[in-house]
Image (cartoon, rainbow, N blue to C red):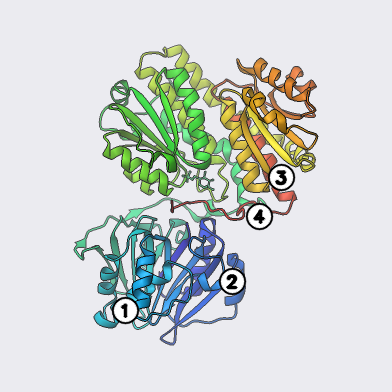
Amino acid sequence: MCGIVGYLGPQDPKKVIIEGLKKLEYRGYDSAGIAVLHDGKTKRIRAEGKLKQLEDKVLNENFNGNLGIGHTRWATHGPAVEKNAHPHQVGEISIVHNGIIENYLEIKKELIERGAHISSDTDSELVAHLINEEIQVTKDLLLAVQKTLSKLIGAFSVVVLWEKSPNELVAFKDGPPLIVGINEKSSEYFVVSDVQAALNYTKNFVYLEDREIVHIKKEGIKYYSALGAPLKKQVITLDWTSSQVEKMGFKHYMLKEIYEQPHAVASALQPHINMQTLEVNLNNVGFENPVEEVLKKIERVMFVACGTSFYAANVAKYLIEQLARIPVDIDIASEFRYRKPMIPANTLLVTVSQSGETADTLAAIRMAKEKGALTLSITNVMRSSIDREAHGHLYMNSGVEVGVASTKAFTSTLALVNLLAVQIAKARGVLNKDAEQTCVKNLLAVPSQLEMVLAFDKYFSEAAKKLKEFKGFLYLGRGVSYPIALEGALKLKELAYMHAEGYAAGEMKHGPLALIDSKMAIVVVAPTDELIDKTISNLQEAKARGGKIISIGSGENLALKSMSEYYLSIPEANWMTNPIISVVPLQLMAYHMADSLGFDVDQPRNLAKSVTVE
Ligand code: G6P
């Protein structure tokens, strides 16, 4: 978490850095700060709270240097107060840091013994102390950084500014992403946590790998290993535009992203469907051998992910086990990596991660590779750390997702796991051509079904107004709708700060029925499938005890409608594609509730989008 921008170039660094930080605010918004050279001295300005506070504070400040660093923070060590905000300055050195220094207590003790005065509660400040100590001796920023890097343990990315050297930045990473942006024409250089922060200025980027150092000078850029060996790095030209990161007239990014879902799902499907034969073809995922050959040998599939991506993995379990008749395990990445998991031979390990940077998911894929698993990543951000780690690659193709609560990445992933289920089933010889074509037709119908759901947004917004009367929410579903209930509850928690729990409808009688009273809403995800009658029976039990039911059903389901306070209709679909459609009303209801309560929908309190610490 945390967003970093470093800039060297002819423009006003304050403007470029603040503009860049705005694009990175999704990574953390507890405090922000910048340090820019002015008359050969470091001028540092920091502010508690969102970036806007910093913007107001620097409005009338002028800087005449060509160099600066900026940061937007998601607090790890120490509360979100100004003294803990970045940049941290010690003597001539200023740094911005993303991540965690695990041996910080040890470093702190040693620094104090050497007489250092520590002014914040952060682990980050210690890095500035160490580099400042080294620079006194070496008088060489690159060398000082190299020496410091050898003392750090943890997951970090850092950009360093030395006020004695007005045309030089050094940055390094071991864990969280750090990307160098280069515009040779305008002699501008950037070091950023995410390319979005520099896309207005360049499309040329170099992705740093762990324990690499970049040395940026006016005369050009050089790359080194932690031990100082020069490295050759590949410059990648991206075709993204910065307009993909604008709100385009929507009140919030999240709302825009919800509305982008028909297009996002179509873009996820498009590269893998042969429109003539209506066949699925995942040959382009990048495995060394033809995909059918590879998947034929697979005896188990394991999914590892966090948050909303984990709920997408839950859906995948239902789809792949039922269609392809192969065991599928699902794991939360932070649990998986420490429970010494058994990864049998011939396992396909699939990670799902919108950002491709989630620290626990990244650790999981590395571990699985070490244990010999074949790995497949489902990511939205191409060339992200997880994407670079995997053997095979599926892309959500959702376009940039800015809202902290994930929406379009979720539905695009559900489309992709449909394809994966079909491809595995084919490879195992349990799906004939007709059945495959039916699956493909069902999938191709999804974008227009999503358009239909979105067209009824006013009903979801009305329902949201009524839902505010309730104190607690139980989200229920059976089968493939169960993970959608979990995702619906998560959306309400993270956006509207209301207590919501997702439950398997059949589990109600094992506890949650005790919670039911007039203030407890029961939101049920019940599109028509082979379990619908069982879901309705479970709802009868809840209704008989005074439960108030808000249901999402396919078309006009009269049985469901008659027992519900509010009935929200979605288009009839197939059991495999239902989850892609039924989640949208839940996203919209959570969005409208949070918005009408005046909460910051795009940046819910205490959260961040890209979780690069464990
Ligand atoms: C954070 C975000 C969630 C996201 C989760 C996993 O918690 O707020 O929206 O689902 O991280 O992120 P990933 O990028 O790995 O999908």
Chain-order first, disc 2 or disc 3:
2
Task: Answer yes or no: disc 4 within 8 Å of ligand 1.
Answer: no
Write the residue at 57% across / 20% down. Answer: 574
Chain-order first, disc 3 or disc 1:
1
Task: Answer yes or no: disc 3 within 8 Å of ligand 1.
Answer: no
Q: Given contact means CB atoms under 8 Å apart, are the residues at marks 3 and 1 in contact?
A: no
Chain-order first, disc 2 or disc 4:
2
In the image shown, does 299 or 294 lie closer to the viewer? 299
> Which numbered marker is on residue 600?
4
Percent across and percent down for residue 224 are 24, 63
Q: Amino acid at mark 4?
A: Asp
> In this rendering, does residue 403 appear at all?
yes
Write the residue at 32% across / 31% down. Answer: 343
Q: Amino acid at mark 3?
A: His
Write the residue at 39% across / 34% down. Answer: 350
In the image shown, does 254 or 259 lie closer to the viewer? 254
Percent across and percent down for residue 140 are 26, 78
Q: Which residue is mark 1?
A: 133
Task: Determine crowd level at label 3: few under 14, some 14-19, many 20+ residues with C-alpha closer than 10 A.
Answer: many
The mark lying in front, picked from 3 and 1, is 1
> In this rendering, does residue 395 appear at all?
no
Percent across and percent down for residue 599 are 69, 54
Separation of residues labelled 1 and 2 (CA atoms): 32 Å
Q: Which residue is mark 3?
A: 592
